[in-house]
Amino acid sequence: MVADTVRALLADRCTGADLRRLMGEGARDPGRWQALSDMGLPGLMLPEALGGLGLSEVDLVLVAEACGYAALPEPLVEHAGVAAPLLAAFAEDARAAAWLDRVAAGAATVALGHAANPFVADPDTAGVLLIAREDGLHLIEAASAGLTRIASVDPFRRLFEVEAELSPDTRLADAQTVAPHLALALDRGALFAAAQGLGLAQRAVDMAADYARARMQFGKPIGANQAVKHHLATCQTRIEFARPVVYAAAAQIGQQDLFSRARVSHAKLAALAAADLAGRTAIQVFGAMGYSWETDVHLFLKRALALAGAWGDEAFHRARVTERAFAAPVTPDQTFARAAAAAASERSAA
Amino acid sequence: MHLDYTPEQRAFRAEARAWLEANVPKARLPSFDTAEGFEAHRAWEGRLHAGRWSAVTWPEAYGGRGLDLIRWLIFEEEYWRCGAPGRVNQNGVFLLAPTLMEYGSPEQKARFLPKMASGEEIWAQAWSEPQAGSDLAAVRATATREGDDYVLRGHKIWSSRAVFADWAFGLFRTDPASERHKGLSLILFPLKAPGVRIRPIPQIDGEAGFAEIFLEEARTPVANRVGAEGEGWAVCMATAGFERGLMLRSPARFQATAARLAALAARGRPDATQQAAVLQAVMDAEAYALSIYATASRLMAGGRIGAEASCNKLFWSELDVALHRAALSIQGARAELADTGDGWLDGYLFSLAGPIYAGANEIQRNIVAERVLGLPKG
């Protein structure tokens, strides 16, 4: 339901023309962000007691898919799905609570420096920074940090190196306390990157299909050729078999065990592989047009490239799936990890 | 989204597992594409039926248990988990039966379904013809009414199991003046009858898995037509939807193969490339299972299988090849050995048929491109 509204809003306010306009204007659209905030989306996963919508990963995954479909430049997904919920985990701390009020009101965003990522995304527009260090998690006002922009291939990614004065006074929680929260943050980052990957992939396929219907060569649309059809059908099939993995990963992420982590990793690998293939295929279908700056397909390819490496790269996620595949092989009765985990504990009890 | 089993579903799983563990033959049955193996598999169908496990989704009146699709998936998981034999009557139980349930008359259901469930009558398909493969609408075989019978004339080919099977279902031109998709009817006919000549065609493994069927004025009652005369294309496409979509290839067999592959890799020393292939196959088997659970849930909520069934067929057929190819790669110099009994080589050869039958994958990709993505016909 929420996702349908987001999809409609972005179809209207995040078009290719909007993206092109923003490339020269700092890459962010305050009006659009306000519209998304008015829907309560930045607080989608915050508890209702903190002024949020009290929804879960299962809901935000659908929103993230819609954001991927539009290649939304604003940092809605990471803020709402990863950074704000991490801050909310420390709501009883007065410093965190003060910021959470502003976050729930849509007046401030949270940026997160997580060990999984070499740089911090969107600290320049954030109100508060959470920075994970060996000694724990620190909270600082974003304005107090030194930011150095690092260029990404994706013109809408805003990556920065962050210099900050961290001390025991800025520490929100020690390393041991924060470890499970950072592990969940990583899984959420990976899950929502996967969900965006689904949207990116579908958009690339849809754009290529539109073009293949319209572009005439040899007296017929290029999409009438099997070579073109088969490329796009292969991409669509990859999407169809990534989507249920992403949705299952969202439903099971709270388990935080070997099974649920492997499923998140599987989701990320499958969805971003689909997005990568779809992006490259779309460029091929568009031909020289696809290689030009003037068509939009490259924006989706580049976002997919960026997200493929964020929140654990392919090697990291393959290692997690490998661990499960060999430590706990998936036999046919173990499709659902929770059932499998229950069966495993029954076995060990017996 | 509820990704867990209910206590009732767990109890059902336990019941299925207990029966299968007590009844599945300990020794691998000979291939059902040999005379001996065919009868051994027929006997297994009979044993399944005696336990009411041969057609679990069917109504109880026909020998089933009236189970929903989730329980069917659970049963399949248990079935393949314990390495039970392949289903020699799969063309009947999983392909024809859903069509009969939807289009068959009460008399047809009563006549054919119980003996299908028991294995007394094993079914073959008779769709393809020498000039009608991927282009199935080019069928030429005719069915001409004479009194209460149809007289069948024509030449069917690539009919799996038809060498030993009892009955076949096929597409015939009931209107001789018709062309393409019009004027076709779905007709059931006995294979062991006058005017039916069967020529075995050895498959890639050397066994008589295929047959040509020469119909030289064979007769079958008009009452054996399924659906209205001339409506055969629509009726058959319903069958094809099931074949591509769901029932023919439950995810459990790929998950069971993937688990065996992971075990094979764990015992050996796969290099990085082999390990990557194993991992991809394991993930894809799981993705297929998650997708089919989602589809089953949708169907149970009243949805239907559409063109996305073609994505399923592409995915499982290419997955099956990849699973077996990865195993043979790990086996190295021993991969070529014919009599190891581990099933990898036979399974590999069998997997190569997957991208061809039930509509070649080139056709499936056309269907996805045209009906899902809206690309123009060529």
Image (cartoon, coloured by chain):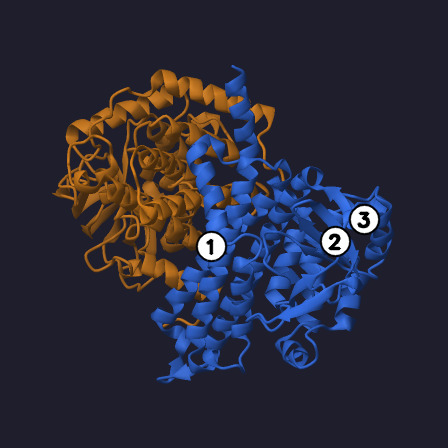
Question: What chain is colored blue?
Answer: A
> Chain for mark 2?
A
Which residue is denoted by mark 3 in the rendering?
A: A169
Which residue is denoted by mark 1 in the rendering?
A: B308
Where is residue B28? Give x, y as percent: 24, 25
Question: CA–CA distance between discs 2 and 1?
Answer: 53 Å
Which-is-in-front pick, marks 1 and 3? 3
Where is residue A114? Give x, y as percent: 64, 52
Which residue is denoted by mark 2 in the rendering?
A: A166
Near mark 3 (Cα within 10 A), the count class, few <14, some 14-19 or many ≥20, is few
SS for callout 2? loop
Residue B144 showing in the rendered view: yes
Quick one: A160 or B203, which is closer to the camera? A160
Q: Residue at x 37, y 15 (%)?
A: B22
Question: CA–CA distance between discs 2 and 3?
Answer: 8 Å
SS for callout 1? loop
> Chain for mark 1?
B
> Chain for mark 3?
A
Question: What chain is colored orange?
Answer: B
Which-is-in-front pick, marks 2 and 1? 2
Q: Residue at x 65, y 74 (%)?
A: A15
Where is residue B274? Give x, y as percent: 31, 46
Residue A37 left/right relative to A283: right
Quick one: A137 or A346, which is closer to the camera? A137
SS for callout 3? helix
